[in-house]
Image (cartoon, grey):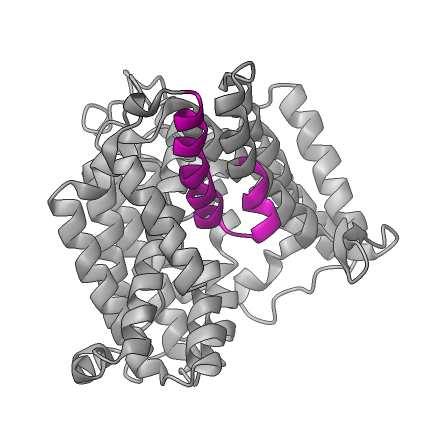
Amino acid sequence: MKHFFQFAQRQTSYKQETMAGITTFLSMAYILVVNPIILSQSGMDKGAVFTATAISAIIGSLLIGLLANFPIGIAPSMGLNSFFTFSVCIGMGIPWQTTLTGVFIAGILFILLSLFKIREMIINIIPEDLKYAISGGLGFFVAFVGLKNAGFIISNKDTVVSLGDLSKTTTILAIIGLVITVIMMVRRIGGAIFYGMVITTIIGIVCHVIDKPTHIVGKIPSLTPTFGVVFKHLDQIFSPDVLAVIFTFLFVAFFDTAGALIAIASQAGLIKDNKIPNIGRALLADSTSIVVGSVLGTSTTASMVESSAGIAAGGRTGFTSVIISCGFFIALFFSPLLSIVTSEVTAPALIIVGALMASEIKQINWDRIEIVFPAFVTIIMMPLTSSVATGIALGFILYPVTMIALGKWKAVHPLIYILSLAFLAYFVFIV
């Protein structure tokens, strides 16, 4: 087992990997509660979505761990489940069955792109400075989500965001958790992020900020309402609206996943010579999980940015992903316990991990203006638009522009120009 997961080469251990896997699972566990709530608003059965969410996370995380030896968790994407429900089903009036079929087709296309190494080639040609910008930008995005979940910042119609009410009990709990976790990390205590979440949860229960679970074991809901529905609606995917939906799923999922993989691989120290080992296998695992998830009955799955919490806790191999998968399997039977893993509990972990990931921007050549502008736009637009894909797209558009202006157009890979034009078309005709 140690040899298979390369423990010696990556300087890790069973204890370290297990702690990392539990940390990532706890950071991701909210998806089991939130995904059914969001997708049920499109008309889907909430219980079936819960089971589909858990099983797709089990399979996806196991695949990427065993095939690519990556310490990453895969589960339904938060941004894409909202797009599924509010933009497509409610906004465009497309039934959830047809929309789910669109996810299935996008997943099949992803598998083909992965098998022909097109996705791998695109990730490998991204300039090194933009890779660091993607990692740093994702760090700011993750920290922004954590600050929002903690109640540190709230929406404001005049200033977009502003400082939240720091006297709220839930926000105070998040502050306590943040302070405890930071102190443990500064003291170099192993598993600080995991222990921080546990201690914060206990404090929340003792102080009656978090409700005790009413019972421990819950019945696994049936998949019958959603399982295999995609095969009954394949004839409805050729309308212009649905084709646009498929393209959008392809675009957003492609670069959300690419951004997460680049950032997480960089954080784990897996990038060598501007390339990520086993990236092709990781992308195939990710693509396969999309197809599996759609057949089970959930929206697009993706590599979860919360995986960075486990990497910060020491995760370096696919054994971390195996532990994540085990966590979701157990959750199928102990779903009531998930109620105590609230956003206030996980918020400190996201803030700290975001800070650690943001440190990647120090690697960028800030003395070269042709690099500074596309890198800065990539970084800043991720949290401002709540989209990793948008940040990457804008960076891709600006990078060739600044290089052409400098007279270095030959230094840009031809595929970068093609993607830049594709992104421009996407913003002009679809967004």
The residue furthest right is 167
Q: Position of residue 133 (x, y in %)?
A: 49, 30
Chain part drawn in magenta = 379-406
Is 393 contained in the magenta span?
yes
**What residue sits 32% from the left and 80% below the top?**
222
The residue furthest top is 367
Using the image, determine if residue 74 lies above or below residue 184.
Answer: below
User: Which one is in front, 136 or 151?
Assistant: 136
Is 248 contained in the magenta span?
no
Q: Position of residue 150 (x, y in %)?
A: 71, 51
Using the image, determine if residue 236 lies above or below residue 59.
Answer: below
**What residue sits 47% from the left and 43% below the top?**
394
Using the image, determine if residue 185 lies above or below residue 426.
Answer: above
User: Which one is in front, 38 or 217?
Assistant: 38
- Is 245 placed left or right of 375 in the picture? left
User: Which one is in front, 354 or 119?
Assistant: 119
**What residue sits 40% from the left and 82% below the top?**
44
Quadrant into which the N terminus falls: top left
The residue furthest left is 116
Can residue 279 be seen by looking at this rendering?
Answer: no
**What residue sits 26% from the left and 56% below the top?**
289
Residue 415 location, quadrant: top left
Q: Position of residue 145 (x, y in %)?
A: 61, 49
Give the main secondary structure of the magenta stretch.
helix
Q: Position of residue 331 (x, y in %)?
A: 42, 60
Can residue 254 be seen by looking at this rendering?
Answer: yes
Give the number of callouts: 0
